[in-house]
Amino acid sequence: MKALSLMFIILLAVALSATPRGLTSREIAVEDAVAGIQPRTMFPPLVSETETAANPFSKDWIPVLEQPLNMMLPAGEQYGVYFRGLDSGAELFSSLGELLPQSETAVGRAPYWIRVELRNTLNQLTPAKQLLYADLINTVQDPYVDEVAFCVAISSPEYLNSAFALPELFVENAVWIYSIASELPYVEVVDTGNSSMQGNYWSTTRYWKKDASGQLVQVTVPRDIYYWYLVNPKITDEIAAYIDPAIVENNSTHSNNIVPPPTGKFWRSYIYDYEQTDFPVLSDTLSLCQSVFNRDGTPGDAIHAVIRWINQNMSFTSNNERPHQPVRIFAKRFGRCGEYADFTSAICRIALIPCTNISSISTDHTWNEFWEDGWVSTEPVNGYLNSPLVYENGWGKVFGTVFEERSDGLFTPVTERYSEGLATINIQVVDQNLQPVDAARVILAIFETAPRFDCEAYTDNNGMVSFQVGENRDYRARAETYFGLYPANPGTYTQLVSSSVDGETYNYQFQIAAALPVPAIEALAPPADPVLDYQVSAVFQSPGYYITGRALWDDIDGLGSQPRHYSKVDTPANVAWMATDSDNLLFLQLENFCSAYDLVGPAAGGYHEFNIPAGQDWYSFADNSHRHGNAALVSGLLMFLTWVSASDDPQAPDALTRLSAPAPNPFSGSVRLSLNLSARADVGVEVFNLRGQRVRSISVGTLQSGVHELVWDGLDDSGADLASGVYLLKVGGGGRSLVRKVMLLK
């Protein structure tokens, strides 16, 4: 006999004329704010181990369809199993539409840490575009798979569905990263694993720098910074595309100069070794650098070389054309702070230095930060390097919010680096019943002669946003939801603090004068099902969620829709699971009410079991209709099972005729279960956690007919102890497999 082992994370858990790159302020009325703030909503108690153990898989059910759950479930959407009454078959169901088989393969080939986002993006593409980008990921070769998969995953569906997006740009982008790295002495790409590693792989860069004492040290770029701020072909609001550098860029659409190659050029490959008389070549300049940044003040590093090269190629002035595309900015060779910031981020990324744009919209300025063992401010046109307080102390700027602008439109306040005085403004948005409203858009403004846009944020699942702001400013704000506004009059703001004080925290609550629309679900007793034939079982949890907002500035929104951005929160969220017939699913999706069987939650996790009465269509699914806008992360295992007698095939060599209930269950030391073989068979055991991950695979060997005992001692493949939790033991032999659920208590 062989010991088994495994592990689990418990169910807790958007005509050429100069136009500004911001908002136009206008006179607006001011209403009073409601002072005070509601305490954060507490999630209901998580499903306990005892409650979970009380709903075990029946010992005579065998799985026909098994689907590990690791997905983003947007607000108002459903995912689960559809049972076809006509032929008693089952298939996966999604209100968003199903992924093509090629897309499932692409998700499986991508790194594990980007699969949720990749699945979400592919699921929103047209079938033709979904196939195009799935095939791209499935056919690209290592070491480029992770870079290509990441770029597809974080691109907006609006962009990928458009004619502007070409898959070859993603491949060209990745190939040039590795090619440039092979030529530059201060940097190298470091690959950890590859696409054959079952998802557990990633890449980053490592480079040399000089510390304050002049010592050369190596720094490894964190994984997420490498992908978002170096690999990413999109800087801010421009469309990632091939650009004809000779075409004047339209200030309204910023897309009239998008043309396919060879006429169209991509900034990373075009600018790196572009040669023109009287201008230095970027590749030649960078090849002379031995370090990325010298903190001891000595010359010869890449950052000083980039600053010098930009100023040799650019002049600070403007005409009517205000381009967003780095290729067109390079062709013009002049611009103002907006063009300089976009161009600087592109040049740094070509030099394999992570870089992003920093903005202070209310004071009408933008500049950059690059990553060098931490974020460092830079503005080449003024020669600024690591001087974040120069704007406040040198220019006399009195900042509101200073924020980093990610390519998908997410704003992250970084005011503390640019203002010696710092205050915090917390705002909670609630409905008329004082229930927190998630994904509400909160707009912060500075009042001068009129309110001026300063920053925006979207609320978390507790209805909260937080702004880091400068001192001595007059702040106003408003909140927007799908079902109401605060203040109630469109475009108006409410007074917050008239003069912010360094070190102070200001708390406010905005109450929408309407109830948050949530579905009215009638929980019904299980329907009569006299025949044991089919069942859906699901063990699920929501270990986190995604604050979901809309990009304020993205050139792709000229096609009619603002792309979304997502910010992951590692705090358990609530999800519901239920079973309905076809009519009630339609009622839920269209009318916001339904009758449901075996309703679980909304809760942070749970167990759902529904015995299916054959003869009509049924749906069993996870549901996120109770949310205003935030997407839930759902993990676990979904199974469609048949009763032994309903699935027996007299032609199949079903040597495995019986598998006993585990005992003891729950267990702390070891658990035993017996299997009965009607004939000699090869027996194997697989152990899964509730994320659907196989944590152990064991070949027991060939066993003779008769009764045999298996013992699992709670260890994983490496021999390490597993954490307390629920596990699924799948025992297979002679063409058949049976599943038992056990609970390990430490």
Image (cartoon, rainbow, N blue to C red):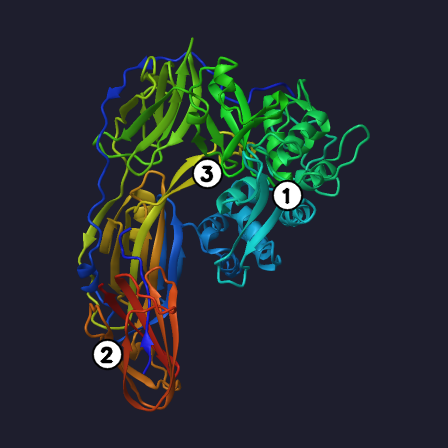
Q: x%, y% of residue 627?
A: 31, 41
Whether residue 252 is visible to the viewer of this picture, yes or no, is no
Query: Earlier along the polypeptide chain: callout 2 or callout 3?
Result: 3
**Depth order, front residue of 371/196:** 371
**Depth order, front residue of 320/362:** 362
Q: Nearer the viewer, mark 2 or mark 3?
A: 2
Q: Residues within 10 Å of mark 1 (few under 14, many from 20)?
A: many
Q: Quadrant of residue 288?
A: top right
Whether residue 200 is visible to the viewer of this picture, yes or no, is yes
Q: Which residue is mark 3?
A: 564
Q: Which residue is mark 2?
A: 660
- Judged from this view, the residue extending furthest toward the right is 277
What's the distance in space between the residues labelled 2 and 3, CA to CA?
50 Å
Q: x%, y% of residue 542?
A: 32, 51
Circles 1, 2 touching at the beta carbon (< 8 Å): no
Q: Amino acid at mark 3?
A: Arg
Q: x%, y% of residue 583?
A: 30, 53
Q: Quadrant of residue 651?
A: bottom left
- Judged from this view, the residue extending furthest toward the top is 449
Q: Which residue is mark 1?
A: 186
Q: Amino acid at mark 2?
A: Ser
Q: Nearer the viewer, mark 3 or mark 1?
A: 1
Task: Check disc 2 and report its element: helix, strand or loop.
Answer: loop
Query: Earlier along the polypeptide chain: callout 1 or callout 2?
Result: 1
Circles 3, 1 touching at the beta carbon (< 8 Å): no
Task: Check disc 3 and report its element: helix, strand or loop.
Answer: strand
In the displayed structure, 480 sits above or below 537; it is above
